[in-house]
Amino acid sequence: MAPALNARAAGAFLLGGDLPIHRLGFGSFRLTARKDWGRGGAPHAVLRRAMELGINLIDTADVYGATESERIIAEALHPYPPGLVIATKGGLSGTGWRHDGSPSSLRRACEGSLQRLKLDRIDLYQLHAPDPRVPIVESVGALAQLQSEGKIRHIGLCNVNPAQLASALRVARIAAVQNLYNLVERKWEELVVACEEQGLAFLSWYPLAGGSLTRRNARISRVAARLGVAAGTLALAWLLRRSPALVPIPGTKSLAHLEENVGAAGFELSDEVFAEIAR
């Protein structure tokens, strides 16, 4: 049986300065392929096991499974255990995930998420992506208004560049940035550094590159085999060491993979291994 998440080894992060989260979260995107599972089946079991293992941050979005992800989370976990932080998103719409960052759309999206998640306030509500037709300050201003009404606790941004983050910070207090980042996709190093310097969490989505880091990266697989750990465990451990602001949010439909992922929190990399797999 896998050990519970080693919060001491992984470290903790105070999201927004007041919400303690373990630095290994759970991304719920993959839970929505439930056609073969049935009500109360595998996605619910994975979420409950994540809680048992000590994960206390779940990330979702209204467009994951066309609202299905949020519904599954509520079915599986409501009433929510103390200390659980739920993050969701708005700003994309429809099956094609069209940009819609208008204030009216963001209000509808937020209120829909509140209803589906059975929450009075969302711990972290994120702009899913900047809308090229709407200035980011307008979108973030709408989230700030929802925050002032008590519907949002903290505001986050996803898929932004440094200039967009800087613009948003002039409008509202931002608690987190969520961008693509993993061992082989490190375009946003500048944002990782900025988040660390400013006390923001950097939630890294796609932290295992959709499994390609564990299946097709020969260097990581070779080092993992030498150390006797799963390649995914090694890749996540690298992220946890890379910066105290980094919070990987791997998602999975597999209980076995979930437990491998949690193992990263207790696996400490030497300086030599950290440098070796980062090449």
Image (cartoon, grey):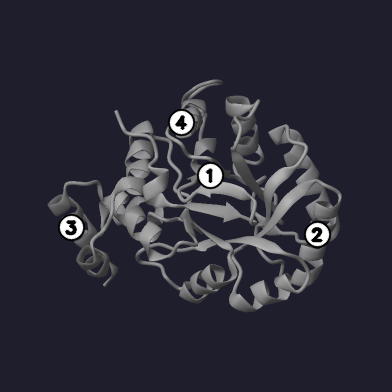
- Residue placed under numbered mark 4 in the picture: 46
Residue at the image point whose x is 36% and y is 44% from the top: 261
Q: Amino acid at mark 3?
A: Val
**Which quadrant of the figure has residue 85?**
top right
Q: Nearer the viewer, mark 4 or mark 1?
A: 4
Judge the density around disc 2: few (<14), some (14-19), many (≥20) Cα neighbours within 10 Å: many
Which numbered disc, 4 or 2, marks the residue that appears first in the sequence? 4
Quick check: 212 left or right of 93? left
- Residue placed under numbered mark 2 in the picture: 144
Residue at the image point whose x is 71% and y is 44% from the top: 122
- Residue placed under numbered mark 1 in the picture: 29
Which numbered disc, 3 or 1, marks the residue that appears first in the sequence? 1
Q: Quadrant of the C terminus?
A: bottom left
Q: Amino acid at mark 4?
A: Val
Q: Amino acid at mark 2?
A: Ala
Q: Between residue 64 and residue 152, name the one nearer to us.
A: 152
Instruction: Let me know if residue 101 appears in the view.
Output: yes
Q: Are marks 4 and 1 in contact (CB under 8 Å)?
A: no
Which numbered disc, 4 or 3, marks the residue that appears first in the sequence? 4
CA distance separating discs 4 and 3: 28 Å
Judge the density around disc 1: few (<14), some (14-19), many (≥20) Cα neighbours within 10 Å: many
